[in-house]
Amino acid sequence: MAIAQPAKISIDEGEEATKNFLEFVKKRTRFKWNASESSNDLLLKNNNLTIYKENYSDKSNLAKGNQGFTSGIHIFEVNSPVKKRGKICIVGFSTKDAQLDREEQQQLCGSNNNSFGWDLNKNNAVWGSGRKMPYPADISDDFEAPDFFYMILDMRSGCLSFRSDSVEYGSCCTCLERIFRNVPLYPTVNISSKGSEVSMALIYSNNSPNDDIGDISTYSSLWKELAEKMKVRSLSSTNYINEKLKLFSNIPRVADTLTTSMYTHLIIDYDETESLINYLKYLQYRSKRTNLSNPLSSILSFLLRFTSKSRKFSKTIVNRGCLDIIVGILDNILRVNQFTDLRSCRWKVFGLIMNISSVSAIQDVMNREDLKSSLMEIYKKEDKDSCLLLNLICLMNILSEKEKATFDLKDSALRLVVKLVVDSSKYVGCKLSKYDKESAVDDTDQCFIIIYPRVAFSLLSGTLTSDNNSLTLLKGCLIESLLKIFQKVDKVQEHAHHIELALHCLSRCLQTVISVSKDNKSLLTDEVYSNIRNRELQEFLKKFSSKYQPSIVNVAKICEARIHEITNGAAKKKKCEIEKIVTSFVRDYLKIDVKTYIDSRFNRCHCRNCHLARGGSDYKSQGEPSRMYPVPIGWFKFGLKLPSRHADKSIDALKKWQIAYHGTSYNNIVPILQHGNFLKPGDTTLDGKKIRPPEWHFTEDNKPEGFNVNQTFLSPSIFYSELYCDQVSFKDKTFKTAFQVLVKPDVYTVGPETMNLGTTAIDPRLPNDELEWMTYHCGAIFLYGFLVKVQ
């Protein structure tokens, strides 16, 4: 089958893509071009990641990288824009003795025994004294190598190969381990024309000759062979399958996310994991009568590791029926106690459930009574701390808010949860293996599971949904433990979001105290009052409410106000002036016809004082299935008149649809209200104006490959949506505007934030890689509230 021709992109888009690529990799790669080992006709730029020929010369020129390789596997991402390849453009490797210049612009790389590579213009593999052969082997006549691709040097198998994100091009040059034994090979580029340039980054490197990650072409063939073995479903093949699965399981452990993603695509593209899941089902069925703990352990390790790195992999195996099999395995663990080896791998099942239940797109299918029942039953009997913690994380991911409210944990389990929160914040991630004196499983596998602060705080937050859990922790170790986090993180500013996560948990706990005390003050013991009045806690809250980022300041002040209410009684509520201020802005500046669009019965002030006076939680859930969203604290909500069809019993939007937000410029507010829905870039308003996207938005001329800009973008987080809001001044105050909407649950896809904020936490409880909801179905969105924030 011929290799498909990649889509061409414009020069402007290519330059922007190159810029983004270089910005991303410059702090993540050790690779540089070596000026002293490159032709004098070539220039280095972009932190020595780009080799460039600025002036014309009648020569062919060669550049070498700063590091040579004699063993192991090394993966480079290459950016060679089609429009900037010139007459000659070859990428590959060379020895230290390779010459740097050749007259008359003739091929240099591959012209002798010191270099070899891929001629991108002529689609040839080149090596030796000008020897060549077509590469890739099976291509269409108009094939053109894409602007971005990967170059893989595997010195264990002696192979140089190339691939794109989705297509393997196969082996380019082989037998390298024999020809260049103990001879360092340097990344090399051969160009000749003025304006030609190539950028390169080393994204994975392991010099070990015995490392278990191999070249993708080899692994592709191996997976096909393995899948065919699994289709047979014979116990006689289990040893072979076990060994090969262990080989693949090692990839997520040693490779970075990008490399793992490439191998994940390889596995999914073969048969959508059908053979893998059917084999797991076969083992689960046979394990009812036979001890198959070793084969089950191998395949669970494989699933655990790939789901930890790939949400797409999680979705794929769930669609293939993986959950039914997991429930069956849990049932076997509960019923067949004599299979102690099977029980010993239960933590892998918990880890697998934890990984897939963290993907919001498949949380709906996790809401299974048989799964909850099995996890609850195991929780009651669990005697290993690491397994207990994993079990609780799974339960908090799949239980509803009502179910969490009645889930009272044992005191020992509560202390363990708090310890995990402290440890994960202290070390920015905590290995579960440290919680058992004697590891429940082999240490190598167990150490692979690391609980990061966001997961630990999410577990604590879910635990605090129960009033009894909150009061027990306030009497005990919660305040003392939070102070340890404040003391540690306050000195490390890049981990400041841990403070915000901790403050949200404290705020939730304090709100529980306020609610409970209204019904029965006797529940508030001296220990609770004493811990809440802790002087060091008061000092930290005072500090956080004055000198930190706005999101931390806001929640710190809420905590201060709630502590004051608990210890001194509720402060007399002052008349809120926010509604008067924002109404003036809406009428006099935005010129909105209030009577036409606003339903004042549903107006609500979410300023800090009004929010505290209502005693509401900072996060709520809405819809069927429900989705969590933050209350827009600090904003005023104008209720909007909903279209009459929202009350249709088949729609029932107020009950069944989910809450989301959309940040926008104040210039777009009136046109959106007039149209009754959001306008996309390029749409024309009623008064003839064309909607233009903000400068930082993706456009048709500036977007990642495969990204469709012709969609409506929402977010479950007001914190993220606010980043897209313009500021406008009116009467000496600053205003921002956004919309709160109802959206039908099954019409959007979930994606990561697109503002390139990296690991910076945007929302305290919602992960960065699930902050954008994208949909083509404008009719499945109802404008629910118009939000205004005044500063």
Image (cartoon, rainbow, N blue to C red):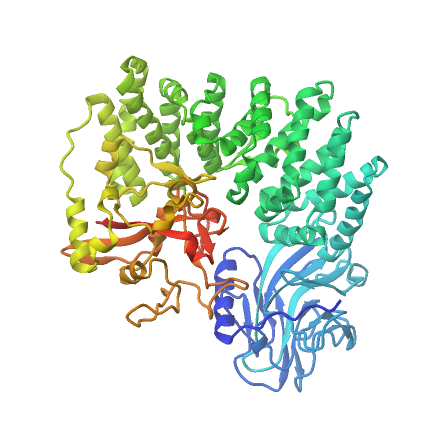
40 or 142, which lies in front? 142
Residue 223 x/y as whole percent: 75, 50
Left or right of 374 on screen, residue 755: left
Residue nearest the observer in this picture, 342 or 646: 646
Q: Which residue is nearer to you in this view: 54 or 754?
A: 754
Whether residue 187 sits left or right of residue 242 in the image: it is: left
- Residue 524, given in percent of the width and then of the height, sits at 30, 16
Total labels drawn: 0
Residue 289 figure quarter:
top right
**Would residue 327 appear left or right of 214 to someone viewing this image?**
left
Residue 505 % position (x, y) = 37, 31
Residue 253 can be seen in this image: no
Q: Residue sitting at 52 percent across and 27 percent down?
A: 392
Above-or-below relation of 184 to 286: below
The answer to whether residue 239 is above or below residue 635 is above
**Residue 47 location, x and y as percent?**
49, 64
Q: In this orientation, does residue 408 appear? A: yes
Is residue 697 depicted above or below 401 in this figure?
below
Quadrant holding the N terminus: bottom right
* Above or below: residue 483 compared with residue 549: above
Question: In front here: 381 or 316?
Answer: 316
